[in-house]
């Protein structure tokens, strides 16, 4: 079993500016040139920073929300929501991919993107504490925060529909699987990037056979990626899915042998959305 001394291989959380500005150059790269191609010298506000007190966590939380461009011009339309853990690493990648795939390629819906800034990712993401991770063990409360406070905030503030995806990297990927096992109705799809499934003697892996056996009608989409660095407990997890996943449970796994733990995020998010929306058309119906 792989062992780690730190789960913080993913760089620290980004510092989010109040109005979350992004340069025209990056906007062009992420297909916002469609709307802003004539304007080359200005920055554009593309999202909102929201801070609020969480009663569940007893701390102030910060989120970054990027709704679809010009969504207010289409008041009758509602959008899926993708919740991004570790937004300092994967928020802008998700933003670029969602906009390119939805606006340019039209192979997935436009989405509301929510980046959740963590004050202590080990506490928030890990189901239990350990000698190496003494602050771990807050995953249950963090999941309760998302389900009882954050989802309600997003749904009441933005035109969200009931479809939700979560993207987690490393310990965040472990948390995504923990969320699946403990609140299976919360998210429809999961993108788990190099998830730390080795943690706590692979407790999430060991629970999965019974979970799948007790949820034979479960209709979820799970994408798992693995880098070239550590086994991460991914291989045993894939074996469980091969053996126990019911027919309605869509899943895929890619081993990126040329990518490191920190570099495989972009490819994983691309492949994850391609798998999740493989049968999607512009009307949101199965092809």
Image (spheres, rainbow, N blue to C red):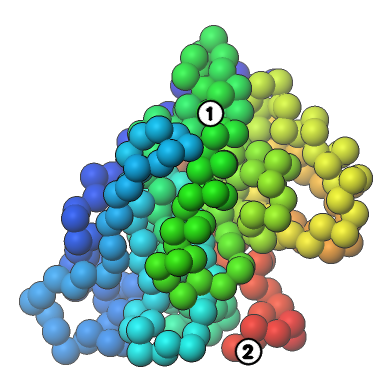
Left or right? Give the position of 111 relative to 286: left
The residue positioned farthest toward the top in the image shown:
131
Left or right? Give the position of 266 relative to 14: right
The Cα–Cα distance between marks 1 and 2, rounded to whole angstroms, is 39 Å
The residue positioned farthest toward the front in the image shown:
55
Q: Which x, y percent locates residue 170?
A: 53, 37
Front position in the image: 28 or 150 = 150
Is 259 drawn above or below residue 39 in the view shown?
above
Q: Which x, y percent locates residue 15?
A: 24, 45
The quarter in which the C terminus is drawn is bottom right
Question: Image quadrant of residue 222?
Answer: bottom right
Residue at left offset 29%, top offset 49%: 51
Q: Which x, y percent locates residue 49?
A: 28, 56
Which is more foreground, mark 1 or mark 2?
1
Asked if one can make out residue 162 in the rendered structure from this viewpoint, the answer is yes
| Secondary structure category for the residue under label 2 | loop
Residue at numbered disc 2: 283
Left or right? Give the position of 7 relative to 65: right
Asked if one can make out residue 264 in the rendered structure from this viewpoint, the answer is no
Residue at left offset 40%, top offset 67%: 157
Left or right? Give the position of 162 relative to 60: right
Residue at numbered disc 1: 138
Q: Which x, y percent locates residue 22?
A: 21, 65
Mark 1 or mark 2, earlier in chain:
1
The quarter in which the N terminus is drawn is top right
Front position in the image: 142 or 14 = 142
Residue at left offset 19%, top offset 61%: 19
Question: Image quadrant of residue 32?
Answer: bottom left
Q: Residues within 10 Å of mark 2 (few under 14, many from 20)?
A: few
Residue at left offset 42%, top offset 71%: 158
| Secondary structure category for the residue under label 1 | loop
């Amino acid at each position: 079993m792989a062992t780690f001394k730190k789960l913080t291989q993913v760089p620290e959380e980004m510092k989010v500016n109040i109005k979350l500005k992004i340069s025209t150059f990056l906007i062009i790269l992420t297909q916002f040139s469609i709307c802003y191609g004539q304007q080359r010298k200005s920055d554009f506000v593309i999202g909102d920073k929201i801070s609020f007190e969480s009663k569940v966590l007893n701390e102030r939380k910060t989120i970054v929300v990027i709704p679809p461009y010009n969504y207010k011009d289409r008041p009758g339309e509602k959008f899926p929501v993708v919740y991004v853990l570790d937004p300092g690493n994967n928020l802008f990648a998700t933003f670029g991919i969602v906009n390119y795939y939805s606006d340019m390629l039209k192979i997935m819906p436009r989405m509301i993107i929510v980046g959740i800034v963590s004050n202590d990712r080990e506490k928030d993401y890990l189901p239990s504490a350990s000698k190496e991770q003494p602050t771990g063990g807050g995953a249950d409360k963090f999941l309760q925060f998302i389900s009882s406070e954050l989802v309600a905030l997003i749904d009441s503030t933005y035109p969200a529909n009931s479809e939700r995806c979560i993207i987690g990297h490393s310990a965040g990927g472990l948390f995504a699987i923990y969320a699946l096992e403990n609140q299976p109705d919360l998210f429809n799809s999961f993108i788990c990037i190099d998830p730390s499934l080795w943690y706590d003697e692979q407790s999430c892996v060991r629970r999965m056979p019974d979970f799948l056996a007790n949820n034979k009608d479960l209709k979820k989409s799970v994408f798992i990626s693995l880098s070239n660095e550590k086994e991460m407990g991914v291989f045993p997890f894939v074996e469980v899915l091969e053996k126990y996943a019911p027919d309605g449970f869509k899943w895929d796994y890619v081993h990126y042998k040329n990518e490191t733990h920190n570099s495989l995020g972009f490819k994983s998010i691309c492949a994850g959305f391609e798998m999740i929306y493989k049968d999607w058309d512009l009307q949101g119906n199965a092809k």
